[in-house]
Image: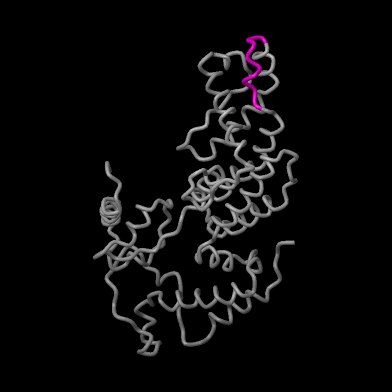
Amino acid sequence: MDRKTAEIVGAFLFHKLATIKLLESELNNVIYVTDAGSNVKAAFNLRNKPILSRITCAGHQLNTSIRNCFNTNPKSGFVILAAGLPVLDLRNEAKSLVDHCKRAAIVKHLKTTLKQEIETRWHSMIDKLASVLSAYDELVVVLLEREEADLLPDRERIQEMHDLFAPVKSAPETLSASKKPTIHLVIPVYHNLIQHFEHIHPSDHDDIRALQVHALNVFKAKLQPAGIHKMAVFLSPSMKRFLPESDRVKVIATVMKHVRQIGVPQDERALMPSADIGAPRPKSIFEFSNLCKLSNEPAAQNGFEKCIRMRNPIR
């Protein structure tokens, strides 16, 4: 796709969905995980096409949150505080140091590999800072011999910037798995990160301290879980009390609404009142009726209430 407009992204999306034989009438039975690009968002709400439900990839959200911590665009809602502007120079100094060491073949004299910051690679800034810190003592020796010690950024400030964002790098690793679900972990991960930013020890350096405050504000604003994340937490027995009571009530109502919308197998339709029987659906690769059985009795609601009353196994 050369021009990634919403229309082109949408055409590509619907073409790919058609290749896996997903019927257009059932596209809204799926919640799609995408990045947060404006063209991608618009592609899910095109005229004359089914309106599709999407949520932002948690890993992408974390990466863009870090980028917003260093935002200087006056039109952005996350412009870095004036007191924090020197951290931009500090970040650039670390980048310039790595670039210089690679161009001048200084890396051949180091036991530790220096890593570059690459905009398209998630959290590469954190990797860069970690590599500079690991090689710092070696760099001091080599650069002093080359009379280039002025290229070294302040070690303490680099350490504090690294420590501020280090937990963000490990978060996508927690949320990424191919053999087990992780959607129920998004809210706990978001919660832990915000707790980290709230309780980190204030720096003695004015610019790092301003960055700490700004980072907390950015992550609080950006890390907003979707409804599906809340449902996943509630439906995980070990975390059912993680949500506040007000959220749990709303989640129960939402879950029950979705349960009632799930198709019912043909052999059970005769047992249900006619009002609960919808029009036959075209056959597709998704047979959601196998996941849930409905009845007239309030068993499902009672099940949720029982789940709430169960003792939380997590201590």
Of the 4 image quadrants, the one containing the N terminus is top left
Whether 263 is drawn above or below 124: the answer is below
* In the image, farthest residue toward the top: 145
In the drawing, does residue 309 fall left or right of residue 21? right
175 or 300, which is in the foreground? 175
Q: Quadrant of the C terminus?
A: bottom right
Examine the structure image and report whether residue 259 is included in the region drawn in magenta: no
Residue at 65 percent across and 38 percent down: it is 161
Q: Quadrant of residue 7?
A: bottom left
Query: Where on the picture, by quarter, is residue 305?
Result: bottom right
User: For this rendering, which residue is in front, 258 or 273?
Assistant: 258
Part of the protein shown in magenta: 145-153
Q: Is residue 2 left or right of residue 247?
A: left
Query: Residue 141, position in %: x, y?
Result: 69, 14
Q: Is 287 placed above or below 36 here? A: below
Magenta stretch containing residue 151, yes or no?
A: yes
Please provide percent x and percent y for residue 279: 29, 80
Q: Is residue 282 left or right of residue 57?
A: left
- Number of marks present in the image shown: 0
Work out which residue is located at the far left of the displayed protein and give it. 48
Residue sitting nearer the eye, 32 or 168: 168
Foreground residue, 206 or 94? 206
Question: What residue sits 54% from the left and 67% below the top?
Answer: 231
Q: Is residue 202 left or right of residue 236?
A: right
Identify the residue at horizontal 71%, vertical 62% (top origin): 314
Q: Position of residue 56 (x, y in %)?
A: 46, 55
The correct choice, above or below, for 55 with respect to 175 in the image is below
User: Residue 185 in the image: x percent, y percent?
Assistant: 58, 57
